[in-house]
Amino acid sequence: MIPAVLVLAALTLAGCTASNGSSSDSAVRAPVADSGTNLVKGKAQEPNADPSGVRQVIKTGSMTMTVKSPADAADKVADIVESAGGYLDSRTEHKAEDADGGSAQLTVRIPSARLTATIDSIKKVGTLEDIEISSSDVTSQSQDLDARISALHTSVDRLQALMAKATSTQDLITIESALSERQGNLEAMESQKRDLENQVDLSTISVTLNSASTAKTQLPGNFFDGIITGWTALVGFFAGLVVVVGVLLPWLILGAAIAAGVLAVIRWRRKRTVRSKGDSAS
């Protein structure tokens, strides 16, 4: 049978390598702390420093552009992103209606190493209105996950070794429970690490494509253009005035009829009053 102290060690190890909580932080970081200060080229370095000097940076951003045809421009943007090794994450289009030429919104994932060149290519699809790119350094977070994952791997290996030596059913059940918990935490952290690496490797950019507004007025280029523009404005004014009159005409007729009725009543009452005064005087 496994000595009681061995089972106690397994339970202590299992509890100390939990992925969450205050006790987990000290236990998971222990393997890093135990190793002491790292030495890189003869110089002391903090445990969380990156020996390679490569920072882990997540880049996100947004772009707004004016294009002739949002649908066609969206196809071009998707082709540019795919040619750069990225992919289209989502796409939403609003069809053109009357004066509205429609719009399109895309969320694209672009390899971070080719982000600048890809954005420069996308800018050529239309007229850039605004752009915003932000960066978030997650180097410490990535290294912290690495340390936790390493500690959990060590914990799992030790629990598996204890399980192989277990002869008591109670000891086996206890170690299996602790091992299952450690493996679950390990899988969760490895998933977090993969997701973080994906965000670092592929930048997320939102692209909004708006159609060119047909309502924009342009100043006349010369005298004859000015005449045409003025004549068009005059015709447009009278056309609008005719529409307004057409809308108001039924109400004007109704108002005139009511006014005529009120005026007729007033006149009738006046005539009646005059006759009554004449009769009383005679």
Image: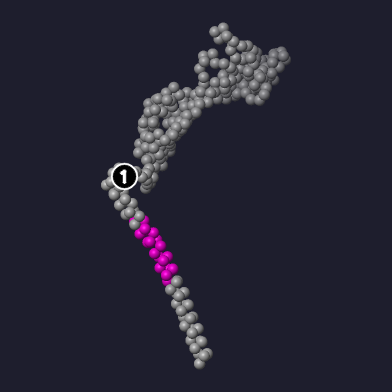
Horizontal and vertical percent for residue 162?
Answer: 65, 15
- In the displayed orientation, state which residue is furthest to the right: 4
Name the side, left or right, on which 275 lies relative to 217: right
Residue 187 lies within the magenta run: no
Residue that appears at 36% across and 31% down: 124
**Quadrant location of residue 123?**
top left
Magenta residue span: 239-257
The x, y position of residue 114, in whole percent, is: 42, 23
What x and y, as percent, mark residue 177?
65, 22
The structure residue drawn at horizontal position 65% and vertical position 22%, both measured from the top left corner, is 24
SS category of the residue bearing label 1: loop
Tag 1: amino acid: Pro
Which one is in front, 54 or 225?
225
The reply to whether residue 134 is in sight is yes
Picture layout, residue 89 above or below residue 174: below
Residue at 47%, 23% (x, y): give it. Answer: 201
Task: Give the labeled residue for mark 1.
Answer: 220
- The colouring scheme, among rainbow, by chain, secondary structure or one colour, is one colour
- 222 versus 152 height, above or below: below
For the point 40% across and 68% down, the residue is: 253
Q: Extreme bottom residue here? A: 282
Left or right, residue 176 beside residue 193: right
Q: Is residue 163 visible?
A: no
Tell whether position 240 is magenta. yes
For the image shown, how many numbered marks are present on the structure?
A: 1
Q: Nearer the viewer, residue 58 or 243?
A: 243
> Between 15 and 102, which is closer to the camera in this rendering?
102
* Residue situated in front as seen by the camera: 270 or 78: 270
Asked whether, in this view, residue 203 is left or right of residue 173, the answer is left
The residue lying furthest to the top in this view is 42
Q: Is residue 268 above or below residue 8?
A: below
